[in-house]
Image (tube, rainbow, N blue to C red):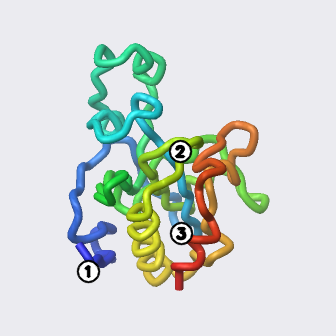
């Protein structure tokens, strides 16, 4: 999977697994994609490697499989991409569509960051360091996105915490921003 490309027609990263999520809609007409938002997720919290995140983003989470899942059963959440601990990348929403990843959010006077951003979820938590391969894969993806969407610049690669302060904390204090920015173009 060393040679990845962004297909401008389909909005898909190729060649990776694409699992369509129903949790998306059209971006507002004329919207310029100019931001990447880095998130973290694990389901159940702190457990890695299962299928629950994929099921959640696709609207098929078995709420009986873990007691904490009942609290998120009604949520309709997705991301454009999910990068697992071992580096596997899964796409849920084409880049040219609006994934429902940021929720109530704002940046530089603009609200509703889902309108103009690409959401990338890393399998992780706020209190565990991320895997080296996750940074490698994230760097590859963001470099491609910066080429496909020139409005995405280094200062517009943010964490969920940056656009929803007080409400969100991810990707957390263990995320190494300096390392990520050092591997970007």
Residue drawn at 53 percent across, 45 percent down:
128
Residue drawn at 69 percent across, 45 percent down:
164
Rounded to the nearest angstrom, the CA distance separating label 2 from label 1 is: 29 Å
Rounded to the nearest angstrom, the CA distance separating label 3 from label 2 is: 30 Å
Looking at the image, tell me whether mark 2 or mark 1 is earlier in sequence order: 1
**In this rendering, does residue 57 appear at all?**
no
Q: Sort mark 2 into few (<14), some (14-19) or many (20+) by Cα contacts within 10 Å.
A: few
> Tag 3's secondary structure?
loop
| In the foreground, 42 or 82 | 42
Rounded to the nearest angstrom, the CA distance separating label 3 from label 1 is: 23 Å
In the image, 136: left or right of 14? right
**In this rendering, does residue 44 appear at all?**
yes
Do the CB atoms of the residues marked 3 and 2 lie less than 8 Å apart? no
Give residue 33's mark.
3
Q: Quadrant of the N terminus?
A: bottom left
Q: Sort mark 1 into few (<14), some (14-19) or many (20+) by Cα contacts within 10 Å.
A: few
Q: Quadrant of residue 65?
A: top left
Q: Which residue is mark 2?
A: 128
Q: Which residue is mark 1?
A: 3
> Tag 2's secondary structure?
loop
**Marker count (numbered):** 3
> Tag 1's secondary structure?
loop
| In the foreground, 98 or 130 | 130
Looking at the image, tell me whether mark 3 or mark 2 is earlier in sequence order: 3
In the image, 26: left or right of 155? left
Residue drawn at 53 percent across, 69 percent down:
33
């Amino acid at each position: 999977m060393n040679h990845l490309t962004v297909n401008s027609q389909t909005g898909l990263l190729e060649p990776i697994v694409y699992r369509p999520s129903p949790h998306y809609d059209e971006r507002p007409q004329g919207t310029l994609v100019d931001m990447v938002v880095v998130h973290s997720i694990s389901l159940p919290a702190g457990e890695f490697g299962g299928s629950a995140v994929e099921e959640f983003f696709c609207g098929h989470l078995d709420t009986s499989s873990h007691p904490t899942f009942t609290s998120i059963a009604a949520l309709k959440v997705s991301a454009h991409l999910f990068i697992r601990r071992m580096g596997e990348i899964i796409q849920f929403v084409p880049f040219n569509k609006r994934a429902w990843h940021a929720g109530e959010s704002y940046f530089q006077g603009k609200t509703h960051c889902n309108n103009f951003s690409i959401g990338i979820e890393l399998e992780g938590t706020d209190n565990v360091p991320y895997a080296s391969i996750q940074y490698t894969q994230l760097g590859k993806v963001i470099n491609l996105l910066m080429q496909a969407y020139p409005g995405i610049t280094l200062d517009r690669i943010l964490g969920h915490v940056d656009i929803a302060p007080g409400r969100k904390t991810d990707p957390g204090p263990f995320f190494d921003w300096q390392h990520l920015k050092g591997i970007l173009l």
